[in-house]
Amino acid sequence: MGGAGAAAAAEGEGAYTVVLNVYDLTPLNNYLHWCGLGIFHSAVEVHGSEYSFGAHDHPTSGVFEVEPKCCPGFMYRCSIFIGRTSLNPLEFRDFIQRMASEYHGDTYHLISKNCNHFTDDLSTRLTGKPIPGWVNRLAKLGAFCNCLLPESMRLESTGTKHLADCRFSDDSHTSSNEHFEDDDLEDKHLLSQSSVSEDAIVKEVHR
């Protein structure tokens, strides 16, 4: 019993919580979720901020930071504890800057490189654990049925259409701000080493 307690204390000491925040893109998820499906946006919360990935038309990072559980244009559904990371705030700042350079907005792809692929990658790098499979199941099904998809959505396409660009006839509660326009991306503090100074990112991470 003492050994188990010591192990738990060692695991928690100097470790920081990593949480996945999941959002609905459509009220249809209330029905699709029971079938193990859904159209979701996700973001990783760590050190008091939330990080995700979105599409734009420029060869700069599409990684952005917002207040936890408050991503504009999406309906918050739930939070899922993923694990812990040993990276302190300063170490994480350097880490996320480097990772952001791997996720340019113009490389976003609905099926092969969407926001959920980013959060899965980020969660795995931070904790060694992936996000739950149901969060990105629709994209995986799309990849499996690639030949049946419209040409613009197939894996060989380099299109940058975001899930938020999809429209649903009963999605009356979805905000009109779902599109990631250039001004919106500025407000979300895009993480890009080429366009954002290190000091600016520090201020945003620790605000």
Image (cartoon, helix red, strand yellow):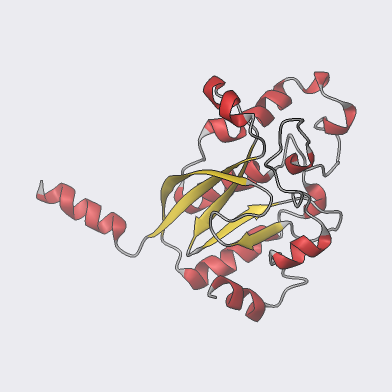
Residue at coordinates 56% horizontally, 58% vertically from top-left?
A: 50
Q: Is residue 23 above or below residue 90?
A: above
The image quadrant of residue 159 is: top right
In the rendered image, the quadrant that contains the C terminus is bottom right
Residue at coordinates 63% horizontally, 33% vertically from top-left?
A: 27
Q: Is residue 151 above or below residue 79?
A: above
Q: Position of residue 156 (x, y in %)?
A: 84, 33
Residue furthest bottom in the image: 199
Is 173 positioned to the left or the right of 48 in the image? Answer: right
Is 34 positioned to the left or the right of 83 in the image? Answer: right
Q: Is residue 21 above or below residue 133?
A: below
Residue at coordinates 69% horizontally, 50% vertically from top-left?
A: 73
Q: Position of residue 78 (x, y in %)?
A: 49, 43
Q: Position of residue 176 (x, y in %)?
A: 76, 49
- Residue placed most toward the observer, 11 or 57: 57
Label tally? 0
Residue at coordinates 16% horizontally, 51% vertically from top-left?
A: 5
Residue furthest front in the image: 172
Q: Position of residue 158 (x, y in %)?
A: 86, 41
